[in-house]
Image: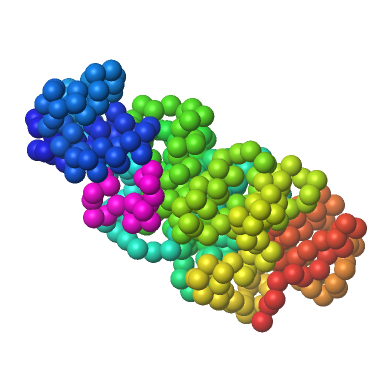
Amino acid sequence: MKGSDSPLVSAIALNAIFGNAPKFSHRLLDALGSAGAVFDLSPEERRALFGPYNDRAAQIGPAALDAALAEFERLSAQGCQFLDIFAEGYPPALRECPDAPLLLYVRSDTPVAELFAPRPAVAIVGTRDQSPYGRECCRRIVKALAGAPARPVVVSGLALGVDITAHAAALEGGLTTIGVSPVGVDDVYPRRHAPFVERMCHTPGCALVTDYPPGTIPSAFNFLRRNRIIAGLAGATVLVESRLKGGGMITARLAAGYGRDVFAVPGRIDDLRSQGCNQLLQEQVAAPVAVPEALPAALGLGRLRRTRAADLETAVRQRFGPAFPEAEVERLVRIAQLIRAERGIGLDELCRATQLDYADVARTAGLLEEEGFIEMDLLQRCAIKVKIG
């Protein structure tokens, strides 16, 4: 087989050889015009181009193309899709980056031509060591994006903490989401997220994306290389929480280097998980996310569409009904109504009013607070937070 016989197979082979040096791949393609042309070089032309001591040049040949063809046939039979940088469906925002991957492996039920059609995309990243504050901010940000007139795709890295919170909140809010993996397309990292990835890949418009060949295992370098794809796919990156050093900080700085918008959630000055965000804000690399509900307008997605439930009971039932037993939903409704009737009511008073154990009341109030229905002060006095029409 000649390289020019199958451009996609040539791209798969070239990615396997030079994937961890994407800028070199770009220079090679600029010089020769296509991936196939690299494999059509004679031994003498290869030596003249790469020099006599380039160990990767020795890998360019029929064996690499045969291996790539076998990989293409095997993965295609398993439903994997491929996109090389010359393909029409390649993400246009990513193609603009100077270190864009030569090849993308894609797991999705949605054809790649539709998956990367022009649409707004927002990357949401941050620490694995997510605090309750970071989790709440992340969910509020995604909820705000879901209410925007121009609903974006949420991009992140499938990691523990902020990443998986953003992905899950996106699906919950009816947004599409793309996870960028640091391992081969035949694997998931971390493994505990495999059921979620399966669900994500079967959701229309969602996908798992990687530039790593099958069999690639996790390594520190892989995470760094993965981050450029997250930043490159999105028009804006939001850093929710991060220490001074971490993958989220790297992604945010990459996004800034690509000329993309960067936002950061401010945090306490004594919280290590907020030091990275606060530093980007101090350096004016990022703009602050002071009010998550204002973020869609700042991103050019339009002002948040505010919808009001007909009443408090309906709002609580709509939120908790699909996921909780009827008895627990009734408890949530009852406690929410008591809090609305008496602003500042404490948990002990709720126990007396409902004849429930303190642990049950505290758990129920915690669920209502987590979903934004109520707020509690340090003395555990409760008040309705949402606006009900």
Q: Residue at x 29, y 34 (%)?
A: 15
Figure check: 331 above or below 274: below
Q: Where's residue 286, x and y in %? A: 61, 57
Q: Is residue 87 magenta?
A: yes
Task: Please state if 279 lies on the left or on the right of 365 as rendered.
Answer: left
Q: Where's residue 226, x and y in %? A: 45, 39
Figure check: 389 above or below 44: below
Q: Residue furthest bottom?
A: 389
In the rendered view, how is the structure colored?
rainbow
Question: Magenta segment range?
Answer: 84-100
Task: Please state if 192 lies on the left or on the right of 48 as rendered.
Answer: right
Residue 146 seen by the camera: yes
Magenta stretch: dominant SS?
A: loop
Camera-nearest residue between 213 and 59? 59
Q: Is residue 170 magenta?
A: no
Camera-nearest residue between 250 and 318? 250
Q: Residue at x 70, y 51 (%)?
A: 278
Task: Please state if 219 lies on the left or on the right of 18 as rendered.
Answer: right
